[in-house]
Structures are given as structure tokens and as C-alpha cells.
Image (spheres, grey):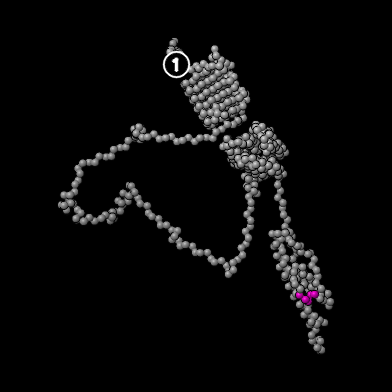
Amino acid sequence: MSEKTNYSIQGLSLVTLLKRLDAATSRLEDITIFQEEAFKNSQSLKSASPAAAIPEHPQPVSKDSASTKTPPGPTDVSSVAPDSSTSTSTPQTASIAKAVPSPPVLPTVEEKTVSLSILDFESFISDFIEPLVSISKKIDPIVFDQANLLLQAFKAELKFLQIVIKSKKPDPTKPIFAETLQPINSEIEKMIALKDKNRTSKFFNHLNTIAEAAPVLGWVCVDIPVAFIPEFKDSSQFWSNRIMKEYKDTDPIHVEWVKTFSLIFGNLKNYVKKYHMNGLAWNANGLFFEEAIKAVEEENTPKPPKPEPTPAAAGGPAPPPPPMPPASLFEVEATPQQETGINAVFSELNKGEDITKGLRKVDKSEMTHKNPSLRASSVVSTKKTPPPAPKKPSSLLSHSSASKSVPSTPPAKTKKQPKKELVDSKWTIENISNDHTIEIDGEMFQSIFIGKCSEVTIQIHGKVNAITISESDKIGLVADTLVSGIDVIKSSHFGIQIINTCPMISIDSSDEGSVYLPKTSLNTEIFTSQTTGLNVNIPDVKDSDDYNEIPVPEQFKHTFKDGKMVSTIVQHSG
């Protein structure tokens, strides 16, 4: 056998075999590196979009380049080119081809669907409420606060509407339904309180305009909200017209404010007409009301960012936790409770012979029967000490000491906020002091209540239905014409002047008052009860510019005739 045949096996030389073995080894290394890169890419695709797509078919590597190593990468994947002497692939190369993973599939992102009615309501807030807040900021900080409260109220109603589109119609009598509407009511109450707190403000008409319109948010509680909204537009328009009248020719920003504010009602009505024509449009196939509330709260709650994994500290794992403190620190020895009263007596008797263990042994020098000196010095009183006198009843004690004790001053009464407002057809004037410039333009269907006022003068223009004065002091009232009459209750130092006519005046439990009647109202009926110091002034017959003061009788004489009481006025002749 020759030397050549010693280094060849079945027609293949040893050099050829080494080349093929080197190429297969390089191929295995490339596949391993590719698998690692593919795994890293799939992990990054889960948290972010892929930077580049993996090619579907790798480029083949030529026979010449198979024997030389090239820098591996994701695009270096290739099948081993067979040698010219063999045309079939080995089972090993087939299994390697199966091990190459396919490109990962990108996850689909589900878009969050939002109801069209919610989007339109958000647009309504951004287009008509937020511009009003911006203009209010330019006028005055108090007006800005009032407009911002209106914005917060509409945002609270937006959250309620989000619950509506997810929920079945609940029972409106349940407490949870009222609790869901509470944020809206809270903002309305804040608007009214801010208006009452700033009655002396220069921009009180602005505050009143928003406060009168705030209850329009209650359209979510009525069956026909389209007819409900215009009612509050008319209430607020009374005050907005005053703004237009005052600033029409002086400051255009107030005119713009009124125009922006008036757009709210028409656009809110259009929204309600489109989505909630016959009341709130509940979701018949939705969740229960409580479940819908939780779902909306979860949607509106911002999710906290995922914490980034902290790298492991160098030098091995973290040290073990410190040992627990000894159990003796947490153990408290229970002290036995000592018995008292009759239980202590019986427990001592039950000791038997041990009852004397607690006694101290008396020395002979301390015994009086064995020590005459102690017997001589000891004095025993033969008088019995009287028992302590019983305590005096608290009722008698407080009565007897009342004359000696200094009378305590009563606590000061908290003064309520002054009020002057029109609600429906009733004017209310309360808690106002030292103001002589109050004027009201009344109408025939309106009534006026004046309560707890002091040192004020009120002038009523036009014809009103009735006027009531209650618990007021030093008050002056001037009224044009009344349909029903005037009632005065528990008041003092009052004066009433009628300009045209008043059918009736009733005065009860009042003191020191004066009533002035014109010639056109001499038929006025005056009723008094428990009233003193009342004078009625009527025009003099001879001099029309002068008045005659006639005191109302206070003293009466009562006699009995034929079984009946006869009361007559006591007249004193001067």
C-alpha cells in the first residue's frame, strides 16, 4: 500500500475532512450566537417596537468562505454548503436547521374605545366652560374662583356620565346613588357660599350669575332635562343683564364674559337633546351600578410606573435579616388584681390559720395593760362624734347661692352671613346691619321677607304681593303698593310708610313703631296684638303737608253684661 492510500479514507483525503470539520464547527458557533441574539430581540419586542425585522431567508455562505471564520451576527445564518464529492445532507445538519427559531410575532395593541357621548361632553367643557374660566381670570380673582368651581362641577358630572354609559339603571332611592351625585352638589354649595361671602364685592353680579345657573347641573336627575335647562337660564339672565347694562360702554371684557356665559345653556341643551332626550341613557346590558363605579374609578386612577429592577450588589447576596428580639420583650407579666369590698373580707376568712400571718407582733413596751405609763398618757374621749351633716339638695343650694354669685355672661351669638337674594318668587333679606341703601324692584307675584335686620332702610319699588318683617330692630320700610298687606312680628323701633295703597297691616308682639298712611290708603285695616308704643300718622284734614299722630290704644276696661264681656278703651282726659 502506497503512502497516499495511508492518508485517504473511501476516496476522501485527510485534508478535505479537516476542512469540512472546521466548517461545521464554525456553523455551530454561528447558530448558537444567532439563537442568543434572537432571544434578546424577542424580549425587547415585548416592551418596545422592534428596530429592524429579521430576514425571512438567510443568505447562503459559499464553500470557500465556509472554512474562514467571519464575525457572527443575526444575518450570518446560512446552511453549510455541501462538498462537490457528496450530494446528500447528514442527519446532523438537518437537526441544526430545525433548531433555528422563527421570527417572533409582534403583539397586537387594543385601542381603548370611548363612548361618543363622553367625547362630546368633554368637548363641551373645553369649548364653553374653560373659556369662561380664562376670561374670569382677567376680571377678578373672586370671579375666577367662582368660574373654576363651575368647571369642577361639570368635571364631576362628566365622571357621573361615564358611570351611566357602563351601568344598568339603578334604584334612585338607594344611598349609593345620592353618594355618587354628592361631588356635584358639593361644588354647587361652594358656589352659593362664595357668592354669599362676597356680597359687598364689586363683581357681586358676576358671582350671582354663576350661582343662579349652577343648579342646571341637576338635569341628570329629571325625566325631561331639555325643558329643565332653560329655567335656570332665565334666573341667571336677570343678573347678567345688569352686567351688560353696567359695562356695555365702559369695559368690553365684561360684555365678552356675558356672551361666553350665555353660550353654555344652548350648547348644553343641544348635547342633552342628542344623547339624553328622555332622561339619562343607561346601558341596559351594562354592569350593576356598584360595579360600574369601581370600573370608572380604576380607569381614572393613574397606574404607577413599573419599578426598574435594581442591579445586584457586588460581593454576593444580601446579608440575612437581623434576628428577632427575645420573647421576653413582648411578654408582660399579669399582675393579680387585688380584691376589694366584701370579697376581700371573705378571702381573708377563708385563709383559716394563715389569717394571722400578716399581723405584726406587738412588743410589751407598746402594751397599755402591761405599761402603766402608757395607760396614764392615753386619753379616751367619752363623747360620741356626731355623724356628718347631710348635704343640701342641689336645687336649694343653687337657689340660695344665686343671689351671691355673679351672673355669668351669656355666650356671644355667632353672626350669620348677610343675605339678599331672590329665590323663585320670594325675596329674602336677612342679617343685614347699618345699611340704608337697600332697594328692590318688585313685581306683583313676588313676596318679601325681612328678618333679623338692624338699623336698615329698605325701599320697595312697584307693586308686590306681601311683606313680612320679623325679629328686626330700628328698621325703616318704604313701599309703593301692596296686594295683600304687611306683617310685623317681634320687632321694635320700626317705621312703615305707604306711598299708594295697602289693604291691611298686622302687628304682633312689637314695640315702639310708627305707620304713615297717605290719603289714598286711609281705608287700611290695622290689627294689633301684644303691641305697645304704636302710633299711626295720617294726613291732616286742614293741611295736606302735615300729619296727625294718633296713638293706638293699649289700655282696656273689661266689664260683664248679660253674661258677656264688654271691653272698652280707657280714655284719659287731660
* Residue, disc 1: 556
Q: Is the magenta stretch mostly helix, strand or loop?
A: loop
Q: How crowded is mark 1: few (under 14 residues within 10 Å), some or many (20 or more)?
A: few
- From the image, which quarter does the N terminus lie in? bottom right
Lateral position of residue 155 relative to residue 345, left or right = right
Q: Where is residue 540 in the image (x, y as percent from the top left)?
A: 54, 14
Q: Quadrant of residue 293?
A: top right
- Whether 289 is among the magenta residues is no
- Say which element carries label 1: strand
Residue 438 vs residue 387, the one in the foreground: 438
Q: Position of residue 506 (x, y in %)?
A: 53, 21
Q: What stretch is highlighted in magenta?
A: 65-69
Q: In which quarter of the image is residue 563?
A: top left
Residue at 64 percent across and 47 percent down: it is 296
Residue 367 vs residue 266, the one in the foreground: 266
Residue 505 vs residue 41, the one in the foreground: 505
